[in-house]
Image (tube, rainbow, N blue to C red):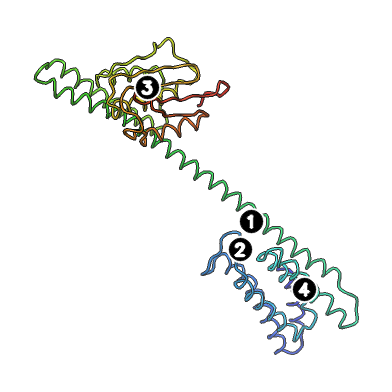
């Protein structure tokens, strides 16, 4: 507010007490309006985002009020008020885009320096002209910096929101895969135990013990998934698949554990889990085959295919998203002999997902 000192001093030096009081009151009012204009933008009833990008009508009336007060002060101080043009230029630079700010700051320079000096027959006040131009440029540059920082902040926030949304989808897929598989096997084993409870009580007890174990494993799986500590491997899922297929009385042809590739163990494990769950739950198959190569895993059955049952449910849709996210492709096709073929394949140069 240093540019208010000179008009305040000259107003104080006026001999007429009425003119002195009037001038001082107008200059003080100008300072209050100038500061209040910024307050209105960022803390007023119609609060603007930071940095402010107000509509033109919310800028014009404070600017017009500032101009009116400068003209009111000019009644007694005449051209001594031209230094207040610095405040107009800074306010314009802070609140308006370059399209409006540049011509309006030029108009302030013209009104504050050139016209008054030419009116009294002197050369333009170049130092004041520079001060007005620099005020508009400096504050306008500050506004641009604030806007860029705000845009960067919003971009980072959007990236964070997207990451959170993606993590929610991942956790949702994981929980679906874990619970879908485990609950399917639990249902099959419970039905089997009910049939055996009178025919073979010992076998029924064994099946119910497996149900308890599977329920505990499912609970542990959900906990590790929510905690971000999920551990899925192809070898472990092969063991689970063998148990689930046997419980559903489906003949299984599975690879030996010593033949398994290590590179895609995690994603292959997820593919096997969801595909076997689909076989047990929806296929009505009598046989299931699992074939694994270093870059692909195939799960086939002799049950009903996609055309007959629409077996590609939400689980396989989520599985496709998981495979694609790790650089692979998932295809679902009907076998000529009947049944469904699920194939996940990866390029040989792809890296193992973390």
Local packing at callout 4 (Cα closer than 10 Å; few below 14, some 14-19, many 20+) is: few
Label 2, residues with CA under 10 Å away: few <14, some 14-19, many ≥20: some
- Determine which of the numbered discs, if any, sits on residue 53 in the image: 2
Q: Which residue is mark 3?
A: 300
Q: Is residue 270 left or right of residue 11?
A: left
Q: Which residue is mark 1?
A: 147
Q: Nearer the viewer, mark 3 or mark 2?
A: 3
Residue at left offset 74%, top offset 71% = 104
Question: How far is mark 4 from mark 2, CA to CA?
Answer: 22 Å
- Looking at the image, which is closer to me, 315 or 214? 315
Q: CA distance from mark 3 to mark 1?
A: 57 Å
The tag earlier along the polypeptide, 4 or 1, is 4
Closer to the chain start, of discs 1 and 2, is 2
Quick check: 333 above or below 27? above
Q: Which residue is mark 4?
A: 107
Describe the element under mark 1 as helix, strand or loop: helix
């Amino acid at each position: 507010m240093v540019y208010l000192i000179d008009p305040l001093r000259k107003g104080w030096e006026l001999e007429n007490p009425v003119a002195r009081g009037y001038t001082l009151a107008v200059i003080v009012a100008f300072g209050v309006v100038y500061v209040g204009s910024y307050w209105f933008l960022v803390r007023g009833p119609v609060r603007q985002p930071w940095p402010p990008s107000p509509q033109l009508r919310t800028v014009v009336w404070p600017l017009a009020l500032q101009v009116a007060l400068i003209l009111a002060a000019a009644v007694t101080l005449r051209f001594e008020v031209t230094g207040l043009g610095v405040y107009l230029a800074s306010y314009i630079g802070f609140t308006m885009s370059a399209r409006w700010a540049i011509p309006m700051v030029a108009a302030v320079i013209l009104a504050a320096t050139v016209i008054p000096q030419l009116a009294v027959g002197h050369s333009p006040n170049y130092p004041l002209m520079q001060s007005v131009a620099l005020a508009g440029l400096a504050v306008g540059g500050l506004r641009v910096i604030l806007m860029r920082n705000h845009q960067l902040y919003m971009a980072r926030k959007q990236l964070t929101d997207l990451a959170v949304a993606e993590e929610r989808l991942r956790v949702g897929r994981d929980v679906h895969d874990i619970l879908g598989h485990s609950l399917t096997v639990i249902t099959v084993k419970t039905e089997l135990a009910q049939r055996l409870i009178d025919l073979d009580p010992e076998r029924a007890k064994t099946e119910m013990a497996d149900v308890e174990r599977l329920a505990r494993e499912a609970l542990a799986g959900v906990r590790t998934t929510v905690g971000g500590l999920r551990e899925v491997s192809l070898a472990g899922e092969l063991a689970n698949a063998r148990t689930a297929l046997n419980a559903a009385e489906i003949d299984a042809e599975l690879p030996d554990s010593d033949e398994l590739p290590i590179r895609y163990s995690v994603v292959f494990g997820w593919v096997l889990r969801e595909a076997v769950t689909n076989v047990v739950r929806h296929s009505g198959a009598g046989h299931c085959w699992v074939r694994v190569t270093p870059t692909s895993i195939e799960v086939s059955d002799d049950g009903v295919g996609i055309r007959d049952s629409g077996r590609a449910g939400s689980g396989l849709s989520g599985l496709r998203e998981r495979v694609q996210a790790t650089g692979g492709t998932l295809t679902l096709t009907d076998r000529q002999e009947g049944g469904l073929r699920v194939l996940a394949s990866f390029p040989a140069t792809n890296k193992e997902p973390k």
